[in-house]
Image (cartoon, rainbow, N blue to C red):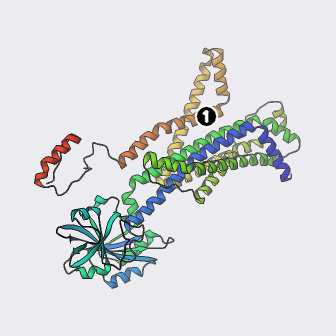
């Protein structure tokens, strides 16, 4: 049969059942929209978290120690990997003097490549490694009562105040250190004589490595080269694991929620496809009597599902592309969540593959039934229940394996993905057995009810397969909806412990004896609790 004639039959079937076709398209599109939005949010969050880890660490790989590295040491480890750019920094504590007062500060000495990731937001001039300038945290300017271009002394060097550090990409929050931070160029470190024999300082080398490099393997090579235990070697992977455990739980949670939503959508779609197939049995009989063989009829129904899947994907992508700016604005205004949602071709490709292959996979049970349909029985409205073929069970196993692989991919963990799928399968078996038992009990007790109730029970028991599918879908969706708030509360507890936690959430340093009474009164008035002093 020519493809043109085959497509004509496909369009006729779709338009003849246009209401059902529209419902199927919207059902799959709705499931894909939810999965697509959660997928975009999850990917955007993961990407921006990784970028933030690079900014905080200062590079892809850093090597630091509370000592000075020799040229031989540095040359030795740099031979073990390739890098695109490097930066050397020093950090130490010193006294910064203004016109009259002085203040303990954390001095960061930078070179011409600093920082490798991110950028400083400064009040006046940008970082310049060629000038004897100094940039300070805003509170230093107020404490020492200095203004722009004033001379300040650090060590034995003299620097000109070039501005304040309004935003430092390497710090999550400003109060993260015991002293405010100041920045000076490495070219003037020797003149300041901050580093001398017996001085305590930290030297750090940061490296920007090619994207093709495996950071974990690279770290292993460097660790074999550097045997000194005082040297710390860190990568962005270490920063992610240490500082974003709760965030990883959250992204895994979003991925599995999206997968559950998509799975329920496909279960519902499977029921609808089976219902549509049952309503088209006479059409199949007519096509067979007209001379079409089984493969040609299968091609018609496969193409129908393919077109429905494509339309669903197009609607989902168009809707998400339109709604993404609104969702971005909603997240910023309502939740103050600075996540930049990015729609990329990778996400579109993933959703297209899942959105097309998913419904096609759901069509397999109907395709297998076509081989056992006889025109005479169909035209006489008789129906013979055939046993499931081995191909049906092969399809079932393949579907479970694909869902299992998707769960591992979404959760980024073999254990979590496998446990999730195992839990879903156990629940399906439990709900299936409960449904069978319930139908048997209702069938036996139906004679004691009125005729109307008996008729309703017979409708359920005679279509046990459809009833079971609907029952399992509704039970799973209800269970998931009831569990989601508990999972959410658990993740929030990881991120933000409850009030019963003994971990302090406010620290105050350098409290003078004459300030204690006043602080205690203020704390008592606003919190109703006593302050705890140490020592």
Residue 372 visible in image: no
Residue lying farthest bottom? 72
- Give the number of marks: 1
Residue lying farthest left? 513
Image quadrant of residue 201?
Answer: bottom left
Q: How far from the left and from the top, in percent, is residue 185?
A: 32, 77
Q: Would residue 422 appear left or right of 464 to someone viewing this image?
A: left
Image quadrant of residue 103?
Answer: bottom left
* Residue at image coords 85%, 41%: 288
Q: Would residue 340 appear left or right of 167 to someone viewing this image?
A: right
**Viewer-proximal residue among 54 and 185:** 185
**Viewer-proximal residue among 302 and 165:** 165
Please tell me whether mark 1 sits on a helix, a strand or a loop: helix
**Viewer-proximal residue among 205 and 7:** 205
* Residue at image coords 44%, 71%: 217
Query: Mark 1 Cα within 10 Å, few/some/many (few <14, many 20+)?
Result: some
**Viewer-proximal residue among 96 and 505:** 96
Q: How far from the left and from the top, in percent, is residue 252?
A: 47, 51
* Residue at image coords 41%, 63%: 53
Q: Is residue 128 above or below residue 338?
A: below
Image quadrant of residue 271?
Answer: top right
> Which quarter of the rendered picture does the C terminus lie within?
bottom left
* Residue at image coords 47%, 48%: 331
Q: Is residue 190 above or below residue 238?
A: below
- What residue is pinned by disc 1? 470
Q: Would residue 50 appear left or right of 147 to someone viewing this image?
A: right
Q: Would residue 109 appear left or right of 421 to someone viewing this image?
A: left
Residue 516 visible in image: yes
Q: How far from the left and from the top, in percent, is residue 424?
A: 52, 43
Residue lying farthest right? 290
Q: How far from the left and from the top, in percent, is residue 109?
A: 30, 74
């Amino acid at each position: 049969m020519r493809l043109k004639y085959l497509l004509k039959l496909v369009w006729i079937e779709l338009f003849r059942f246009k209401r059902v076709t529209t419902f199927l398209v919207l059902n799959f599109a709705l499931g894909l929209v939810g999965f697509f939005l959660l997928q975009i949010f999850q990917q955007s969050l993961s990407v921006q978290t990784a970028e933030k880890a690079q900014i905080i660490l200062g590079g892809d790989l850093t090597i630091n120690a509370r000592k000075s590295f020799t040229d031989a040491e540095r040359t030795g480890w740099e031979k073990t990997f390739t890098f695109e750019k490097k930066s050397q920094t020093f950090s130490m504590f010193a006294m910064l003097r203004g016109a009259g007062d002085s203040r303990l500060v954390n001095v960061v000495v930078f070179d011409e490549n600093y920082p490798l990731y991110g950028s400083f937001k400064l009040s006046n001039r940008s970082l310049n490694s060629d000038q004897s300038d100094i940039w300070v945290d805003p509170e230093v300017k107020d404490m020492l009562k200095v203004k722009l271009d004033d001379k300040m002394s650090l060590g034995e060097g003299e620097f000109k105040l070039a501005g304040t550090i309004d935003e430092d990409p390497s710090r999550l929050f400003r109060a993260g250190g015991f002293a405010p931070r100041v920045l000076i160029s490495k070219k003037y470190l020797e003149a300041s004589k901050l580093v001398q024999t017996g001085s305590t300082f930290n030297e750090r080398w940061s490296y920007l490595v090619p994207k093709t490099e495996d950071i974990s393997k690279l770290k292993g090579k460097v660790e074999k080269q550097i045997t000194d235990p005082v040297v710390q070697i860190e990568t962005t992977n270490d920063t992610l694991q240490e500082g974003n455990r709760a965030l990883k739980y959250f992204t895994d949670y979003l991925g599995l929620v999206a997968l559950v939503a998509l799975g329920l959508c496909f279960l519902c779609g499977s029921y609808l496809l089976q219902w549509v197939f049952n309503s088209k049995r006479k059409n199949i009989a007519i096509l067979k009597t007209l001379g079409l063989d089984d493969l040609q009829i299968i091609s018609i129904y496969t193409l129908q599902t393919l077109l429905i899947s494509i339309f669903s994907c197009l609607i989902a992508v168009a809707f998400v592309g339109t709604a993404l700016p609104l969702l971005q604005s909603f997240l910023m205004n309502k939740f103050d969540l600075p996540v930049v949602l990015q729609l990329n071709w990778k996400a579109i490709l993933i959703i297209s593959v899942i959105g097309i292959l998913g419904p096609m996979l759901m069509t397999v049970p109907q395709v297998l039934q076509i081989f056992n349909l006889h025109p005479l029985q169909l035209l006489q409205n008789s129906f013979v229940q055939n046993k499931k073929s081995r191909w049906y069970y092969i399809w079932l196993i393949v579907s479970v394996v694909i869902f299992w692989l998707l769960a591992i991919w979404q959760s980024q963990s073999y254990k979590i993905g496998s446990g999730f799928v195992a839990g879903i399968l156990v629940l399906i078996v439990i709900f299936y057995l409960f449904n069978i038992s319930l139908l048997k009990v209702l069938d036996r007790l139906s004679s004691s009810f009125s005729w109307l109730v008996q008729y309703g029970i017979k409708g359920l028991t005679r279509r046990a397969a459809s009833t079971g599918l609907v029952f399992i879908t509704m039970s799973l969706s209800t269970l998931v909806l009831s569990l989601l708030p508990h999972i959410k509360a658990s993740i929030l507890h990881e991120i933000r412990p409850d009030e019963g936690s003994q971990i302090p959430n406010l620290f105050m340093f350098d409290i003078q004896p004459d300030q204690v009474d006043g602080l205690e009164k203020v704390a008592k008035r606003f919190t109703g609790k006593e302050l705890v002093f140490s020592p």
